[in-house]
Image: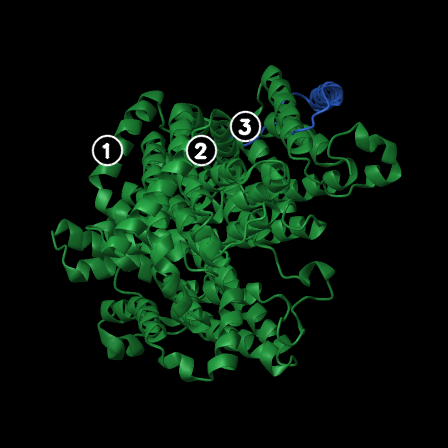
């Protein structure tokens, strides 16, 4: 009943993994260029 | 006598035959599949049983009626079992039917009692659901004359009774509650007036012509403020939940249910009874049961709203019982008891079944198969919840940086499913901001939703009643009784307020020069909007403007009085506000052991029937900065989504949010983002085939639509 195209799904899953990696690399480069992880306000109650 | 015996034998035979048919392994498998889907859809905020039933309907074309209804009712019966999970763990009602569960379930999770609250919710859902099925089984043959006796005036009176609950639900702010309820009714009237065709408050927007859909409004008012506060407080919902507590609490939750069996029975009766009255939205049932428990349970006034398990039990037993009740008019008269039942009515026609006497005679076995399906689905659903309860409960100890991106993505998808227009997302954002401000300034939000849910119904039945009966409908006994109960419910909190202040005379003389506070700016904003709305309504047809104007004027008076009280009422010595004063008075009375009527009256006032912000300990500038950042995220999210689609945006957002907000380690960020986007793709793109909002990339490069998920 559920029509799932495994090939299409696997390709999309792979593509999404690559996309996440690209975003992460770009962010890491920008983060490094700006001098390390963002100095966010300290968690209040952790 | 023989006739009665023969009748009973006929019923029992049909019930037995239906049970044997349903025990077929394939049918049981479909029932279980329906339960799983119902639970999942109940847990996912914004996608409730309504959307689920509609989505499943096409898959039942080739099934026999027993199997088809096993699947559909498996889903419909268990969404109310699954939806307390987000309500308790996140404070986000999975559906409108579990909105009242939030009030006590969420505080319990915060106290580290998530396991107990969930267990009590499952068990009371099971008991309520089985009771609902039982109610259907015995009422089908006998309810027909009663149902025929109810006309539009009675249905109107039931809706008015539902609206009168705003007074109970507004706790320490009855005027604000009344204003919020009236605003809700006015929101429900946005769109084309069914009587005259007048466009009411549509602002030349095609999106608003059919009225504002409930889902983005519900998600905006209840889900976004909780997520915003999560970012502001930067802490997990439950800070002290341990696994030991979760396991220990489960058994306690079961014991709670057996201990309060009488409450479950009463609330199930409310759920089943109200659910069986057509036209009254299922969203009211849990509020009515919660209000009933608040009024009748010993000591409830002191503990409800702060994490009392009885609040969870009342709400959950009633909302599961309503499915059985709602089936009664659907099956017997073809009058859907709820919106889900309206879709189910379509299933009847698809399978060649005609609701009405046939369902009680030659197709009685199908009717009883439905009864068994509802009962078994509730047992299966609760069993599944118990089996995976620790996994669900674990969610409440997750960090905000893990919860927020996932919930936000699902909230966006849920909101968009309302009408599948970008307007849904704008509504989500606007009502999210409104909800957060209301939460910050302690304006009760539930009355707003109640107004929206019942507003349309009230106006429709009012016109039918006046057209059909003139003013004579007011003298019908059931109408009169229901109206009296509604008026008493509305007036009671104001009388208690007067009593607290030592009578009307003292109340009217204890005023001073105006004092200003930032929270009054919001009240002034509300008054301005209400004034503008009433002014716009002046030019409409009489039939289109009468109800909105009356409601608008009531809201203006209530909000104006509230503002005047806020500015000019003299504070009692040593106390800052009416709320503080009441809290201290209740604490004094409780510590002095005075638990009598006066204590109950004041305690009633103390309860703020909504979740209050846990961010009061933070400096104002931090609250404002973080809230601005949250709503900034939402705006940027929507902007990027408009270009590249929702799923790639979720991936981008998760990476940025987890790293920027909480400096999570890269391995976790990449794993979490990948798993989340793949899961969303699988469930919503491949299983549910959800239509996505149109995107610029999709328009520029149509060939990419089959490659990039959610690109439309």
Q: State which quadrant residue B664 falls in.
A: top right
Q: Nearer the viewer, mark 2 or mark 1?
A: 2
Q: Residue at x 49, y 45 (%)?
A: B95
Let me know if marks 3 and 2 both belong to one chain: yes
Q: Residue furthest left?
A: B593
Query: Does the residue at mark 2 contact the one at mark 1 (Cβ under 8 Å)?
Result: no
Indicate the chain on which mark 1 is placed. B
Q: Chain in green?
A: B
Q: Position of residue B144 (x, y in %)?
A: 39, 61
Choose the circle earlier in sequence order: 3 or 1: 1
Mark 1, residue position: B255
Q: Position of residue B639 (x, y in %)?
A: 73, 42
Q: Residue at x 65, y 27 (%)?
A: B682
Name the residue nearer the viewer: B253 or B463. Answer: B463
Mark 2, residue position: B22
Name the residue nearer the viewer: B280 or B230. Answer: B280
Q: Is residue B432 visible?
A: no
């Amino acid at each position: 009943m559920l029509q799932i195209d495994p090939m299409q799904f696997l390709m999309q899953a792979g593509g999404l993994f690559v996309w996440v990696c690209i975003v992460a690399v770009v962010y890491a480069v920008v983060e490094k260029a700006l001098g390390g992880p963002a100095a966010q306000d300290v968690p209040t109650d952790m | 006598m023989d006739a009665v015996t023969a009748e009973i034998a006929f019923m029992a035979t049909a019930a037995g035959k239906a049970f044997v048919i349903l025990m077929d392994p394939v049918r049981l498998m479909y029932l279980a599949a329906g339960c799983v889907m119902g639970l999942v859809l109940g847990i996912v905020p914004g996608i409730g049983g309504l959307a689920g039933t509609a989505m499943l309907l096409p898959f039942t074309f080739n099934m026999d009626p027993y199997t088809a209804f096993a699947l559909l009712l498996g889903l419909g019966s268990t969404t109310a079992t699954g939806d307390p999970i987000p309500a308790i763990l996140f404070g986000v009602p999975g559906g409108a039917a579990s909105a009242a569960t939030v009030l006590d379930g969420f505080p319990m999770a915060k106290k580290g009692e998530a396991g107990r609250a969930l267990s009590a919710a499952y068990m009371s859902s099971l008991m309520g659901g089985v009771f609902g099925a039982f109610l259907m089984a015995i009422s089908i043959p006998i309810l027909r004359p009663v149902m025929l006796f109810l006309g539009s005036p009675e249905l109107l009176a039931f809706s008015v009774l539902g609206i009168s609950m705003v007074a109970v639900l507004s706790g320490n702010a009855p005027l604000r509650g009344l204003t919020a309820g009236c605003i809700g009714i006015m929101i429900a009237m946005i769109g084309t007036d069914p009587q005259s065709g007048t466009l009411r408050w549509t602002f030349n927007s095609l999106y608003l012509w059919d009225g504002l859909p409930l889902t983005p409004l519900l998600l905006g008012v209840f889900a976004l403020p909780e997520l915003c506060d999560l970012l502001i407080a930067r802490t997990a919902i439950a800070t002290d939940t341990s696994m030991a507590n979760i396991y220990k609490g489960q058994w306690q939750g079961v014991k709670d249910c057996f201990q309060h069996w009488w409450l479950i029975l009463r609330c199930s009766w409310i759920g089943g009874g109200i659910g069986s009255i057509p036209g009254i939205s299922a969203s009211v049932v849990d509020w009515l049961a919660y209000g009933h428990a608040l009024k009748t349970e010993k000591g409830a006034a002191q503990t409800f709203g702060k994490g009392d398990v009885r609040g969870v039990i009342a709400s959950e037993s009633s909302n599961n019982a309503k499915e059985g009740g709602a089936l009664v008019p659907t099956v017997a008269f073809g009058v859907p008891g709820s919106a889900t039942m309206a879709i189910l009515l379509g299933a009847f026609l698809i399978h060649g079944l005609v609701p009405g006497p046939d369902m009680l005679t030659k197709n009685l076995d199908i009717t009883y198969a439905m009864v068994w399906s509802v009962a078994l689905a509730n047992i299966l659903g609760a069993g599944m919840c118990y089996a995976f309860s620790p996994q669900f409960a674990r969610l409440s100890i997750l960090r905000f940086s893990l919860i927020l991106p996932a919930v936000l993505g699902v909230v966006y998808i849920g909101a968009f499913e309302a009408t599948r227009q970008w307007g849904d997302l704008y509504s989500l954002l606007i009502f999210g901001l409104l909800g957060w401000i209301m939460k910050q300034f302690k304006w009760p939000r539930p009355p707003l939703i109640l107004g929206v849910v019942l507003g349309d119904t009230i106006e429709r039945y009012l016109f039918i009643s006046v057209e059909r009966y003139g003013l004579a409908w007011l003298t019908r006994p059931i109408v009169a009784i229901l109206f009296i109960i509604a008026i008493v419910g509305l007036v009671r909190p104001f009388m208690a307020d007067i009593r607290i202040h030592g009578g009307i005379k003292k109340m009217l003389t204890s005023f001073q020069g105006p004092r200003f506070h930032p929270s009054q700016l919001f009240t002034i904003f509300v008054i301005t909007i209400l004034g503008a709305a009433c002014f716009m309504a002046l030019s409409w047809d009489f039939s289109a403007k009468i109800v909105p104007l009356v409601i608008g004027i009531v809201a203006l008076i209530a909000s104006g009085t509230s503002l005047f009280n806020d500015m000019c009422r003299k504070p009692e010595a040593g106390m800052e506000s009416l709320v503080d004063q009441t809290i201290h008075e209740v604490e004094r009375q409780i510590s002095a052991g005075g638990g009598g009527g006066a204590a109950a009256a004041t305690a009633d006032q103390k309860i703020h029937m909504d979740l209050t912000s846990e961010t009061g300990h933070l400096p104002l500038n931090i609250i404002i900065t973080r809230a601005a950042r949250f709503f900034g995220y939402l705006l940027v999210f929507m902007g990027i989504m408009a270009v590249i689609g929702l799923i790639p945006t979720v991936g981008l957002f998760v990476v940025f949010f987890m790293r920027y907000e909480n400096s999570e380690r890269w391995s976790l960020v990449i794993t979490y983002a990948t798993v989340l986007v793949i899961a969303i793709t699988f469930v919503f793109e491949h299983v549910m085939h959800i239509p996505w909002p149109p995107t610029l990339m999709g328009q520029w490069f149509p060939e990419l639509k089959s490659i990039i998920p959610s690109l439309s």
